[in-house]
Amino acid sequence: MKNLRVANKPISVTSHPDFDFVKDKSLADIAVGRVGCGPAGKVFLEFSERSTNSHYLLSVKDNSVIDRLREVSHLMIECSREEVAKVPSLSKPDLIRIYSGITL
């Protein structure tokens, strides 16, 4: 009988009970920069002219979520610049981890 091992893979969290990632701007309350030297990690309350290709659109449960995202935006910006080779980018798991106050 073969020895079976389960790989110790980290779990990638891509959702949070305080907000939903949405594709439609009309359903979003806020945008967070996903990629790029300027927007990555930044929080945008006015995002009608922002590209859905370079921003996460979030539908939030209440305004305290927006306040929390704005409080930690400097950490999201820092993370977007540290963990990439060239172009700053922020992953959904990193956004959720930072929002939740989880450090690695």
Image (cartoon, helix red, strand yellow):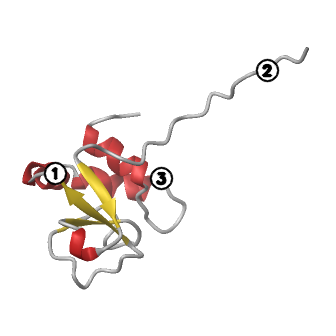
**The disc label shown at residue 2, or none:** none
Instruction: Report x, y in % for residue 93.
Output: 42, 47
Instruction: Report x, y in % for residue 31.
Output: 25, 67
Task: Look at label 3 and name its amino acid.
Answer: Glu
- State yes or no: discs 3 and 1 in contact (Cβ < 8 Å): no
Disc 3/disc 1 C-alpha distance (Å): 29 Å
Instruction: Report x, y in % for residue 38.
Output: 32, 73
Crowd tier of the residue under label 1, counting other residues whose Cα lies within 10 Å: few below 14, some 14–19, many 20 or above: few
Look at mark 1 in the image and give the residue it sits on: 61
Earlier sequence position, callout 2 versus callout 3:
2
Look at mark 2 in the image and give the residue it sits on: 4
Q: Which picture quadrant has residue 88?
A: bottom left
Instruction: Report x, y in % for residue 68.
Output: 15, 48
Q: Measuring 63% from the left and 27% from the top, which residue is drawn there?
A: 8
Determine whether the residue tagged by mark 1 lies in a helix, strand or loop: loop
**Position of 34 relative to 49 (above/below):** above
Crowd tier of the residue under label 3, counting other residues whose Cα lies within 10 Å: few below 14, some 14–19, many 20 or above: few
Q: Measuring 43% from the left and 63% from the top, which residue is drawn there?
A: 89
Q: Measuring 19% from the left and 55% from the top, which residue is drawn there?
A: 60
Q: Which picture quadrant has residue 55?
A: bottom left
